[in-house]
Image (cartoon, rainbow, N blue to C red):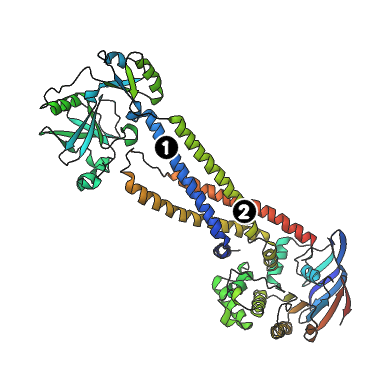
Amino acid sequence: MRGKSYLFLAFKSFFHKKINIINAFLLIICTLLIIFSCSFFKTFYTFLSNSSTGNLSYRTLRVSSDYSVIDKKWLEEIDGVSYVISEDEYRLTVKTNNDEYINLYGVPNDFIKVNKGELLTDDEVIICPETFYLGLEPENYNKEFVSKLHDGSNYLGEIFTFIINEHELDYTVVGIFDNDKYTYGEYNTCFTSITNMHKLIETELENCEGCYISEDSNVYVIVDHVNDKDEIAKKIGSKYSVDEIIQINTPTITFILSTFLAVTAIILIFVFIILFILTKKFMTYNKESNLIYKAMGYSNKVLVRVNYLENLILVVFSFIISMIIVIIIYFILLNKYNADIKTGINIYISYLSIFGSFTACLLISLLSTRFALKDKKKSIIEELDDCEI
Amino acid sequence: MEAISVDKLCRDYYLKNELIHAINNISYTFEYGKFYAIMGHSGSGKSTLIQCMGLLDKVDSGKIYIDGENVSSLKEHSKNEIRNKKIGFIFQDYYLNNTMKAYENVMLPMLINDKYNKTDMKKRAKELLKLVGLEDRVNHYPKELSGGEQQRVAIARALANSPSIILADEPTGNLDEFTEKYVLEKLRKLADEGNCVIVVSHNPVIVEYADYVLKMKSGRFIYEG
């Protein structure tokens, strides 16, 4: 029998069996569930992973003391401490000539690894994220500027003019960093050298009577890894008071993720069982049609292949519908608002999850057909043996 | 000329642990160009005989010859080929595929016959439907057809691969008097054209159309005439 004839029979059967609407619905749920659970898992796994290794907010301890000047050198010598910086040198929000506000942080020159461009130097340079997260009113921003912000390679080499106390200071973007790894979880985070930060803060305080950079103010301690944070905090706590900027409850998040995956797995097993029952009940390969197809000269092998092909069509059809739904949900809805998400968490739809969902649905469908056929064939043979046709 | 010949054919089966001799040592030769009516009460074994001759059911002993070839010992794929090319089946319940239009149902046997391409299949299916008076029902689904029309589609389907042997199991069982006459006339015509037509029925009207009437009881022919 020719391939076209197989397709003809499978398509006919597929489009006229009302039960295929339920089967397709189940497979669509299955596909979406796999894609979104994988994406959810990957998103939060990446988030946790980056929080642990890179995201500075989770790695920062604030150290303060009411009684004595904080010994920065002692803090720097603690194992697992990346660097120590005074509160007054830590951050400055500057306005650009585009009316855009940027949060600048002072870091050691080699601290931030760049994706593109160069590391920091003490020249008037900054490194900025691959993608800026816009503020709460993005419609107020200069559109040309915003379009550049969405692709870091567009503004590498760009000069930002900071307006501080009526001074215009030109800073060149020399490097682009990965948002996920270094963002502070705020909008428009850029980094400059500690020396530059010092200079900028001095400019900021220029006309402010009584304002000065205090050497004995609170300090921020940035640790190498979030897992070491508690131990380092305990050590610092013996001498100064210490608190975390943002607390992260990794076990809870891991528990939520595991539960979500477990629920997904249980749903997949249920879908498999339902598909098995429905496939068995409504498959083309049944006693009545088996008799007439057999009378026309069809072999059991052909009928079995038609059933498999029908299920393959079902999987492909469900997959296409699922992809349309994913595109609508993700690429249109999520992407539209992704830039506004305050935490800076990127939602991932990986190709692997798409491929995985297709493979899983294919396996579920083909295996349920295989088991149903095996069961059905056995019962047909038994019936034919026991009764007169 | 010999179409189907059965030699000491036996078929037994168990019904509620009781051994039933559905076919009990039957020998007979069916010839081309003749119309055979096999009659008998329910359970007499007539349907089992037609299923065995059509290679749809296995036999316990004895031999079946089609065109002089012993087909009872053939492998399944060879039996499939014989069913597809040499035999046309008609059943009481039509067994049309409800998901397909009338002409697509007629095309079914041709799909596994390499002789036809899609255009030829469609053309032949429409010709056959015209032959059974359904030229205006070509694109109708079985549900949109009356019982008689469905049986005519089933006849057209049975003739799809130009078989030389037609086996019909109670073909008029669900039909009204007018359609019954139409179907039997068609079968008679097929026999006159040189085919071997074997019809299983308990309807006495069939006697008027048959060349030979065979009565069955307890798996044996008790009357030949």
| Rendered-image quadrant of the N terminus of chain A | bottom right
Mark 2: which amino acid?
A: Thr
Residue A306, quarter of picture: bottom right
Chain assignment, label 2: A
Is the C terminus of chain A in the top left, top right, bottom left or bottom right quadrant? bottom right
Q: Nearer the viewer, mark 2 or mark 1?
A: 1
C-alpha span from label 2 to label 1: 35 Å
Q: Nearer the viewer, residue A4 or A342?
A: A342
Q: Position of residue A374 (x, y in %)?
A: 68, 53
| Camera sees residue B119 | yes
Mark 1 residue element = helix
Residue at 34% from the left image edge and 33% from the top image edge: A181
Image coords of residue B133 (percent x, y): 62, 84
Side of B3 relative to A236 (left or right): right
Residue at the disc numbered 2 = A369
Q: Crowdedness of circle 1 by 10 Å Cα count: few (<14), some, many (20+)? A: many
